[in-house]
Image: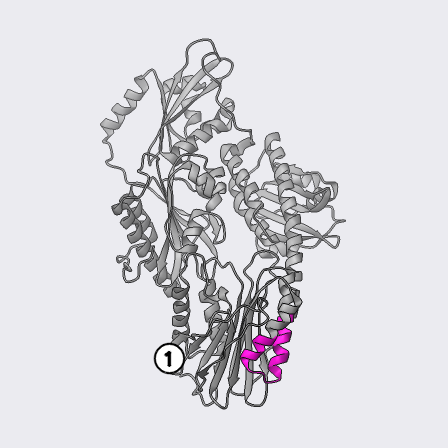
Amino acid sequence: MHRPGTTTAPAPGEDLDAVLAEVVRGTGASVGLAYVLPPEERVLRIAVVSGVVPGIAAPWARIALDDPIPVADAVRERRLVWLASQEEVARRYPRLGIVLPYDFMLAAAPFAHEARVWGGVVLLWPTWHPPALSAPEREAVDAGCRRAGALLHEAARRGAPLFTGDEPRVLTPPRAAEPDPGEARAALDCAQRIPVGCCALDMDGRITFINTAAAELVGAGSASLRGARPWEALLWMNDPVFEDHYRAAVVTRQATSFTALRPPDRWLSFHLYPDDRGISVQITPLTGVPGQGHAQPERLPSVGPGGAGALYHLMHLAAALTETAGVSDVVETVADQLVPAFGPRGLAIMAMEECRLRIIGYRGYSKEFMDSVDGSPLTAQTPTVHALTAGVPSFFGSFDELRSAYPGAVRYEQRDAWAFLPLIASGRPVGSLVLSYDRPRPFPPAERATLTSLAGLIAQALDRARLYDTTHQLAHTLQTALLPHSLPAVPGLDVAARYLPAGHGVEIGGDFYDLIRCDASTTAATIGDVQGHNIQAAALMGQVRTAVHAHATAGTPPSDVLARTNRLLCDLEPGLFTSCLHAQLDVAGHRARIATAGHPPPLVLHPDGSTEAVELPPGLLLGIDPDAVYSTVEIPFPPGTVVVLHTDGLVETAGTDIDEATAAVCDRLARARDRTADELADTLVRHATGVATRNDDIALLLIRHEAGRQPPR
């Protein structure tokens, strides 16, 4: 979305609220969500919402940049994401389709400023919108994103926090005009005289007005209904069908209707008419034989007080848990989804380790309190331990109930209800889940059953995640053993190396690097990439690195090093191919000799500050043809020169032209020219990781000719 040279500065005093409001007005969107991406984080957070209450947007309050969610894709890839129908939403983003199974159109776009993305916007329209954005709408989105990007960039420059508070700010739509008292009185009298039931809901689903006819039809007094949600105030409406239609009306801004049976035999028809301030509801009785001619509406499973919102949250959580990897992913996902669904004030997840319960994640507690209960022995008389050892959940609706069962129970702040749930996977206890609430809570049977089932899902995900973490640690250990533990100190050279796995599979890759002392004035540097991300690739990587190291130590020219290593790989017939670049650096002679076997060219920062990607004869990948011939190219290597050997993960990202990406890395290298090798390496890695999705590992070997170089000013 960001267009070079078209950055729009924010107006004096403008804030993100004003930018989102202007984008919503300029596009006619019914819903708008503004996300921020704080510096050094990879999690988007909702900062401002328009057109919905935070509860409906709660499943996406925090979105990891790797999540399969439209705004995450827009931010990572710096492009507009457009979804023209419910079918397209379900096909491309099934998790979104689960929680919002309604018909709407959606756009997501990034807040970009120069080389950085600071967040993004999500906009929704009813389906009467044309199948594509118009030119004025697209320009309104572009302009708003540019202003938001510049605004957030400036805030970060000043050190101002981009996200404050636990809840997003909610924009209130402007009212056309305030009625005078006489007009308001006349409108009220009019509504009371109409024999048809009518009521008004705010955007949170609470009744703000109900006329006498409607109160009589639903069988309750007006005073008891005002300020309450119908599906919570009326027992016979404690079915998710009503809330589901309310959510559909809010999200799609389209009229909807359904029928419901008020016991024992009175059928009522409900028609919902939404706008950006609330929903008008018309209620009429149906005539005829009860139940005949009026099909009972399809019903959603009952989930207790949480209603349809909780059901969709839990479905979203179940889908999200299938995509988690490590334990930290599971903890963050559970906290982000479970808290909005059932409203606990605090959450703690504990795992069993060496006959003790260890806290592996929490939300809504202080670190000091968590430290005080961490490591409880399995012999302790606590509800947390009992839930785990007995495999039975415990629910306490008040602190008096908890203290009666466990006199030594410790109360945190004013928490007044608790659920202690065992986490059992494949018949084995793996931990406990504790939820605490600010107010007394009855925990009806439906809610208890749902929470207990949910604990089973979390246990399975946690058990899988712990296995993943163990495998990840094993992979990391193997990778570390195969790469150099340290780089040799070479007089006249300042060197640094980095290795970052792509983050998929077991994170064992075939990228490698090495620095080899040949004689007093000559040093060899090599970097390569074995095809694949598995144990076989890592094992072959170790063989290639050993072969290159042995030939280079003997002072073999770069072209011969590659040719001999190639013949070895062809003899081994590993079934995998390897790219490799080998350089011989003559520090005293101020020259470098380089050969490549299908590897990305090195980047060079010259003493005058210019940069280039060195053009080399491509050479055939190692392990294909035993008779392949490789060429050596010589380049100047005077003091002050920086040579960057890298694998393709440094410059290749999805949807980005390789030449443009390489030029961007060269530009970043030139702008950081006075930094040390370590600082330069960190700068390039931060640039490469940024917010883009990486599909490959990054190996980086950076060498600066220091001899005679003046220290940076």
| Residue 212 location, quadrant | top left
Residue 570 visible in the snapshot: yes
Does residue 544 show up magenta in the picture? yes
454 vs 293, nearest the viewer: 293
User: In this view, which residue lies farthest toward the top?
Assistant: 289
Is residue 271 shown above or below 595? above
User: In this view, which residue lies farthest toward the front?
Assistant: 627
User: From the image, which quarter does the N terminus lie in?
Assistant: bottom left
Is residue 586 shown above or below 286? below
Q: Where is residue 485 shown, x and y percent of the image?
A: 63, 74
645 vs 387, nearest the viewer: 645
| Residue 612 location, quadrant | bottom left
222 vs 9, nearest the viewer: 9
| Residue 444 location, quadrant | top right
Three-letter code for the amino acid on which mark 1 is drawn = Gly
Q: Where is residue 709 shown, x and y percent of the image?
A: 44, 87
User: In this view, which residue lies farthest toward the right?
Assistant: 379
Is residue 365 shown above or below 150? above
Residue in view at x 46 percent, y 43 percent: 92
The chosen color scheme is one colour
Does residue 87 show up magenta in the picture? no
31 vs 656, nearest the viewer: 656
Q: Where is residue 524 shown, x and y percent of the image?
A: 56, 81
Number of marks in the rendered image? 1
Q: In the rendered view, does 607 fall on the left or right side of 383?
A: left
Residue that label 1 marks: 609
Identify the secondary structure beneath mark 1: loop
Residue 364 visible in the snapshot: no
The residues colored magenta run 543-564
Residue in view at x 61 percent, y 48 percent: 348
Q: Main secondary structure of the magenta part?
A: helix
